Image (cartoon, rainbow, N blue to C red):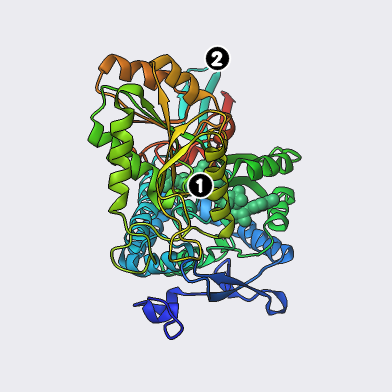
Amino acid sequence: MLDSATNLADLLKDPDLLVTKAYLGGDWTDAEGGKTFEVTNPARGDVIAKVADLDRAQCAKAIDLAHAAQKDWAKKTAKERSQILRKWFDLMIEHADDLATILTAEEGKPHAEAKGEIMYGASFVEWFAEEAKRVYGDTIPGNAENKRISVIRQPVGVAAAITPWNFPNAMITRKAGPALAAGCSFVVRPPSQTPLSALALGVLADRAGLPKGILSIVPSSSSSEIGKEFCENEKVRKLTFTGSTEVGRILLSQAADQVKKCSMELGGNAPFIVFDDADLDAAVEGAIACKFRNNGQTCVCANRIYVQSGIYDAFAEKLAQKLQDKTVGDGLEEGTDYGPLIDRDAVEKVKAHIADAQEKGGKVIAGGKEHALGGTFFQPTVITGATQDMAFATEETFGPLAPLFRFETEEEAIEKANDTIFGLASYFFSRDISRVTRVQEALEYGIVGVNTGLISTEVAPFGGVKQSGLGREGSKYGIDEFTEMKYINTAI
Ligand SMILES: NC(=O)C1=CN([C@@H]2O[C@H](COP(=O)(O)OP(=O)(O)OC[C@H]3O[C@@H](n4cnc5c(N)ncnc54)[C@H](O)[C@@H]3O)[C@@H](O)[C@H]2O)C=CC1
Ligand SMILES: O=C(O)[C@H](O)CS(=O)(=O)O
């Protein structure tokens, strides 16, 4: 446990993983003038570290280093890049406990869940260590007797990344893995709430033997300035962002000037549909796993739970009952199921969604208030009588609030589920094979969970449609985001 007498370093087997300097192409560097920003522990609200606060000029230097080193990195064989990535993966697994402790200290999720994120994050490095050796091209029958046609894939060049606080490890490795595997160099600006997890990844990448210049981690309290550098610096050929749709729009418009290759993993508003023919207990378990993972702070959490009329009351009662057994507390404490929210703004958003629902006829049947622990702890909450005119029907709550909407027909459920500008994840529970086929095809989302509330894996293409993003991460498709296709037409 962190407290006034115990620092974060005291909790680590390898305290060298706790770094507060920036990682500029392999050199640990202070900010100009020694400027720093504070990192706080969301459970206790106290400062756990002061991290180098880099400015745009230092970010530009990192990009210069990345640009200078990238060609030699791309010249290495795929196997050489693969071996370094595999070593990085091995080190992440070896130090998983410490990485999880650092993650919980700055983000708040329970240690066991943080450990799960570390394994999930490491799986992207492992996966793309393998995919590095499978960046294939084509040969195409010539368009004339004396013509030969081929297609090759080459690394884009310098890739720049901006990542969110809710998965401080995995959202970086889900980008760095394919980028480095493809032969790109990689500059990442981590969120100011959770930079320590990113810097710990830098320590292990260095130990794995990543060549100088290939990786930079640029912590900064000024997200917009660094974002502008990424968008306006012509040496950056790829921008990859994970975060809200609002910020994604800003970055896309900034990147449009140079027509930069962009990947966007943005916001969601996931429907979770339970049909009368579902396995009710499985649906309740699935809803809890989906809605309350990271305390509801994931882009793929169920944001709207639609339950068919015939089982609505039974589902609501079981869900509320199950939540009574959950423990809210400090993520570093044994037995905690749900940690704190990231900050007060997050708490205020949950409260606003609850108040709005109650004003419009919604009924709180579980939780509904700030937790007795105070700070940013909140009770896991269930609201019945949810309707499409309530705020959470169109806005992402990003907190532990499960609104239950009643529906009568399959057509109604699909129409309401699709009635959003977002299209990231969706879920439904049914044991009718014809219905499963119809619904999985009718839902306008990049991801559909059928009889499951958990869809996150490195082997599948993660991404959204509509205003939830562009591109895919993970799977055999993920490396395409960091390569360019070149077509060669040769006259012989
Ligand atoms: N699709 C996905 O995989 C994910 C989506 N999200 C979405 O992100 C939101 C919550 O995460 P937040 O970190 O609060 O999102 P956010 O969009 O506010 O911030 C994301 C990152 O962008 C940076 N940023 C903010 N304004 C910027 C600007 N003008 N220029 C450059 N960088 C800027 C932030 O400092 C942070 O590092 C939710 O909407 C959630 O759905 C979060 C995680 C994953
Ligand atoms: O940041 C997020 O919400 C992640 O994308 C969710 S996941 O990849 O862990 O499913």
Give the image quarter of residue 475: top left
The disc, 2 or 1, on the residue closer to the chain's N-terminal end is: 2
> Mark 2, mark 1: which one is toward the viewer?
1
Q: CA distance from mark 2 to mark 1?
A: 54 Å
Q: Which residue is mark 1?
A: 398
- On screen, 23 above or below 428? below
- Between residue 151 and residue 335, name the one nearer to us: 335
> Where's residue 349, x and y in %?
57, 49
Residue drawn where x is 57% and y is 33% of the image: 394
Residue drawn where x is 55% and y is 19% of the image: 147
> Where's residue 252, x and y in %?
68, 40
> Where's residue 421, x and y in %?
58, 29
Query: SS of the residue at dot 2?
Result: loop
Mark 1 sits near ligand 1, with its Cβ under 8 Å away: yes
Q: Quadrant of the C terminus?
A: top right
Query: SS of the residue at dot 1?
Result: loop
- On screen, 228 above or below 422? below
Can residue 160 be seen in the rendering of this structure? no
Instruction: Decide if residue 107 is on the left or right side of residue 307.
Output: right
- Report the label total: 2
Q: Quadrant of the N terminus?
A: bottom left
Indicate which disc residue 60 carries: none
Label 1 sits on what residue type?
Phe
- Between residue 266 and residue 86, name the one nearer to us: 266
- Between residue 257 and residue 296, name the one nearer to us: 296
Label 2 sits on what residue type?
Asn
Q: Residues within 10 Å of mark 2 (few under 14, many from 20)?
A: few
Q: Which residue is mark 2?
A: 143
> Where's residue 2, x and y in %?
42, 77
Instruction: Decide if residue 267 is on the left or right side of residue 128.
Output: right
Q: Residues within 10 Å of mark 1 (few under 14, many from 20)?
A: many
